[in-house]
Image: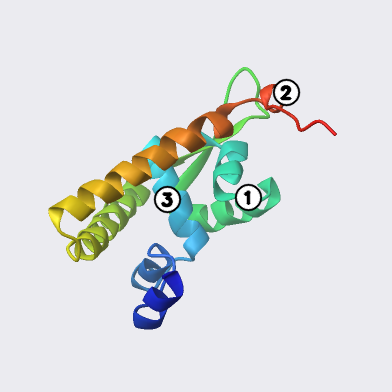
Amino acid sequence: MLYALGRLHSLRDPIASTCDEFQLTPSQVHVLLWLGKDGTLAMGELARRLGVTEKTVTGLVDRLERLGHVVRERVAPDRRVVRCRLTDEGLKTYQQLDQSLLLALEGLLSFLDGGDRKALFRIVEKLVRKLEPAAEAPLSTVPQKTA
């Protein structure tokens, strides 16, 4: 069914489709969205959320810092911890991105009737509930298969 949908309409990441408008890469957009949604984040946490190495996120943050969207801050007492936060300019860009994505989502959901939208939300909520414990559980508590 996804292949059939893809033949009718591109299945590209909806966030990626906003990149041209904002002249940012998909990864840069994701950084701005995470920081806008959750506030200041450590570089390591940002890398984990993006699914990239800390070296890669350092390059992303370097470029966003040069563009005036983010700043780095060291945390006392452990000065090795570096956190990122949006600047005022970055916050404006985040708000524009958020609005653009909301409009795109509203457009997509407008193809569904109320009952289908409710069903979709129930399914997504169920997936989130099922995935949350697995993502938050320390590796030592995750059950291991026995041979």
User: Badge 3 local density, few (<14 within 10 Å), some, or many (20+)?
Assistant: many
Label whose residue precedes the other's in the sequence (3 or 1): 3
Dividing the picture into quadrants, the one containing residue 36 is top left
Using the rendered view, name the quadrant where residue 1 is placed. Answer: bottom left
How far apart marks 3 and 1 lie (CA) works out to: 14 Å
Q: Position of residue 81 (x, y in %)?
A: 63, 30
Height in image: 21 above or below 48?
below
How far is mark 3 from mark 2, CA to CA? 32 Å
Residue under label 3, please give it.
Answer: 32
Asked if residue 119 is positioned above or below residue 101 in the image, the reply reads above
Q: Foreground residue, 109 or 147?
A: 147
Q: Which residue is mark 2?
A: 140
Counting from the top left corner in percent of width and height, residue 38 is at 40, 36
Which residue does the numbered mark 1 point to in the structure image?
Answer: 58
- Mark 3 or 2, closer to the camera: 2
Q: Is residue 98 left or right of residue 2?
A: left
